[in-house]
Image: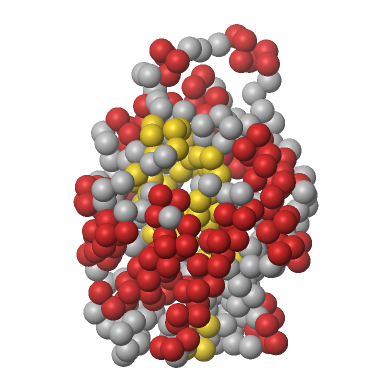
Amino acid sequence: MGEEQNLHIPLLTPYKMGNFQLSHRVVLAPLSRKRSYGNIPQPHAILCYSQRTTKGGLLIAEATAISDTAIGYPDMPGIWTKDQVEAWKPIVDAVHAKGGIFVCQIWHTGRVSNTGYQPNGQAPISCTDKPLSPSNDGAHYSPPRRLCTEEIPHIINDFRLAAKNAMVAGFDGVEIHGAHGYLIDQFMKDQVNDRTDEYGGSLENRCRFALEVVEAVSKEIGADRVGIRLSPFADYRESGDSNSEALGLYMAESLNKYDILYLHMVEPRMKTQLVKSECSQSLVPMRKAFNNTFIVAGGYEREDGNNAVADSHADLVAYGRMFLANPDLPKRFELNAPLNKYDRSTFYTSDPVVGYTDYPFLDQASSAQV
């Protein structure tokens, strides 16, 4: 398999993302795995991430909490303490040793939490005091406390400090988590945000918090190291919007002012082949509006990932469950080899090996035969 053949596989063509030279366009999506005991990244993550590293490949680390109020699940990693930063260093070093580019996704869960995860048992914070219904898996969410206007700069500063810490840990950049019903998404979506101050009401006001986070993080570490993930069409955790396309377009256009490295957008949920084909155009207006690298995610397989790049609907395609189950996913795409099937039951267990680092690579014999 030579570089010449790879040029006929759009996902495996090189791409220059800002100052980073990527060897292919297959991105490891941020995947929460709940194996950072006590909110401290663990040594087993070194193997997990290094297994999925290729020279010139982009990896986005799992969602990482920016502060002690940002936690909403057990054993999620953080990046607000010195111990956490130190624990990330060998993980980042392992990715860099194999030539990968590694970005830390920084997040705050907002109201997707309960008092048991919060300092001193306090209420989770959000843009609203509207409670979240219990989830299908039995997770209980405590009624949130609405942030006062004067408190919001402190949360923005937590994002800034987390980005600064990510640089100390050695990451190449950060991805601000503005998707999937968490704090930033709560501010943006009109189903959740019922504020009457400058952070609520109009589309511009609802997006203000997200853009202020982008500005603060960009000033701290440089816009050329900043990405953001958005899911305007999603209504995860009761965070829908009445005009998703307008929201996505407004954010894509507004982000150009900050000249950030990339915009990572999630497609509407794809459930059937029919829906999939109908959804393929949904992010194109945002792609056209945004000036820099555009990453898509959401149910992509090899063929439609190749099509997205070939049709210029995206520069890069992020793969989650497929990359989780296939640590050598770019190689399998190159050879059009069979894929391991993922086991959903082991996604979020605490085991440091099972469902984490034990998915098999293509064996040497099958590689040689192709």
For the residue pair 238 and 41, the one nearer the viewer reads as 41
Side of 363 relative to 43 (left or right): left
Side of 198 relative to 147 (left or right): left
* Residue at image coords 32%, 72%: 207
Q: Looking at the image, can residue 169 be seen? A: yes
Vertical placement of 201 versus 312: above or below?
below
Q: Position of residue 307 (x, y in %)?
A: 32, 32
Side of 182 relative to 234 (left or right): right
* Residue at image coords 45%, 82%: 152
Vertical placement of 155 versus 104: above or below?
below
For the residue pair 272 and 325, the one nearer the viewer reads as 325
* Residue at image coords 64%, 75%: 68
Q: How is the image coloured?
A: secondary structure
Q: Looking at the image, can residue 31 be seen? A: no
Q: Position of residue 31 (x, y in %)?
A: 57, 52
Q: How many marks?
A: 0
* Residue at image coords 53%, 83%: 125
Picture quadrant of residue 363 = top right
Q: Position of residue 131 (x, y in %)?
A: 50, 85
The C terminus - image quarter: top right
For the residue pair 19 and 321, the one nearer the viewer reads as 19
Q: Residue furthest top?
A: 369
Q: Position of residue 201 (x, y in %)?
A: 27, 83
Picture quadrant of residue 216 = bottom left
Picture quadrant of residue 139 = bottom right
